[in-house]
Image (tube, rainbow, N blue to C red):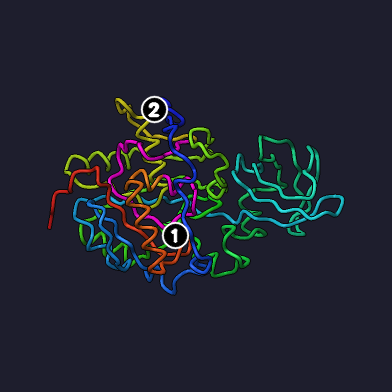
Amino acid sequence: MPPAGPATLPVNPDLQLSQFDYELPPELIAQTPAAQRTGSRLLHVDRDSRLHDRLFTDLPGLLRAGDLLVFNDTRVIKARLLGSKESGGRVEVLVERITAERTALAHIKASKSPRAGARLRLADAFEAVVTGREGELFAVEFPDGVLALLEAHGSTPLPPYITHAAGKEDDTRYQTVYAREPGAVAAPTAGLHFDDDMLARLAARGVESAFITLHVGAGTFQPVRVENLSEHVMHAERFHVGADTLEQIRRTRAREGRVIAVGTTSVRALESAAARLTPAPAGGDAEGDTRLFITPGYHFEWVDALITNFHLPQSTLLMLVSALAGMEPMRRAYAHAVQSRYRFFSYGDAMFIESPNRPPPTHRT
């Protein structure tokens, strides 16, 4: 593994949380996915910060042979379990990270936090034991393999702004078609718009695909609680960028193609890998925990463009897209999206953002 780079970077002390707020009518928060994966709208923010109302099915026409799409292949696990404490009190367990075959770190909601040694009856099917605490997370030991128990008895952990309980449709649609590495408790939602036919169309145009893994944690939904962003402590997420993907990025750069991240999680993984491989690539994979907090003023090493959904007001993800596109262009884009009645958040519509700070791609037919 290459030597570790910086866990995070200094944030401009003049950046304030209130600069990333906007008014969103509640009815624009998508509660269910589009009938078809590719059936959403697409707001295109071009290199000159101009806005174009498109459909997601228009995406292949915006890409060129030689471009590289980088997808996050993490798989959402059925991380939510309901149960009771020995006292009979209700408890909700949300597995954040599987640490070994039979152990995990989890968020636990209960009227009173359980202590080490507490036994939890979960899904009325098995008992788990709280063995300790690491910050806001509880260490939990399961009686059998964590993944198998979650798959059999857990439920898909939908975001807090989706009001219905997870059903069978969510088990399928809150998962990308290329998901393969289990470990996420939230979907990399930009990828939800792609189906197999769209991937085939892109490949036929000469657009290449590569994969990284970043296991999205529940921290992605945590609000920023400080006004001065330089005081914010970013949550950690596990990522892996393989040597094959690193080589694809180098080849793309050599032919003057664009590296296009599919989702903010792919951005975080790629830019974290770039930090770990700077100044001289050491070969092999780049992996580890990242707390990279991307805000306006950040210099992107590898990412030229981004496919993403619309993000919550005052969220770290809105700050990331503002870093790529510029704060004022993002304010205009979000105001336009609200006025034009785009659908927001995980099950909502998409954006294609081209960085104004990158050179134009070489045209290929």
Residue linked to disc 1 = 176
Type of amino acid under label 2: Pro
Asked if 226 appears above or below 177 in the picture, the reply is above
Near-viewer residue (48 or 348)? 48
Which residue is farthest bottom? 35
Can you say whether 117 is above or below 35 in the image?
A: above
Number of marks:
2
Mark 2, Cα crowd under 10 Å, few <14 / some 14-19 / many 20+, is: some
The amino acid type of the residue labelled 1 equals: Thr
Looking at the magenta stretch, what is its main secondary structure?
loop
Q: Quadrant of residue 333?
A: bottom left
Q: Position of residue 59 (x, y in %)?
A: 28, 63
Is residue 85 left or right of 193 when viewed as pictured?
right
Residue at 28 percent of width and 60 percent of height: 51
The residue sitting at 50% across, 65% down in the picture is 25
For the residues labelled 1 and 2, the Cα–Cα distance comes to 29 Å
Find residue 234 and report its horizontal and vertical position in percent. Answer: 52, 37
Residue lying at 66% horizontally and 34% vertically, measured from the top left: 134
Residue 212: image location, x then y, percent: 39, 45
Identify the disc placed on residue 2.
2
Q: What's the residue at 53%, 40% (across, down)?
A: 227
Depicted 88 relative to depicted 39: above or below:
above
Which stretch appears magenta?
Answer: 290-319
As for residue 223 lying within the magenta part, the answer is no
Which percent across, then down, holds residue 279? 30, 25
Identify the mark nearer the N-term, 1 or 2. 2
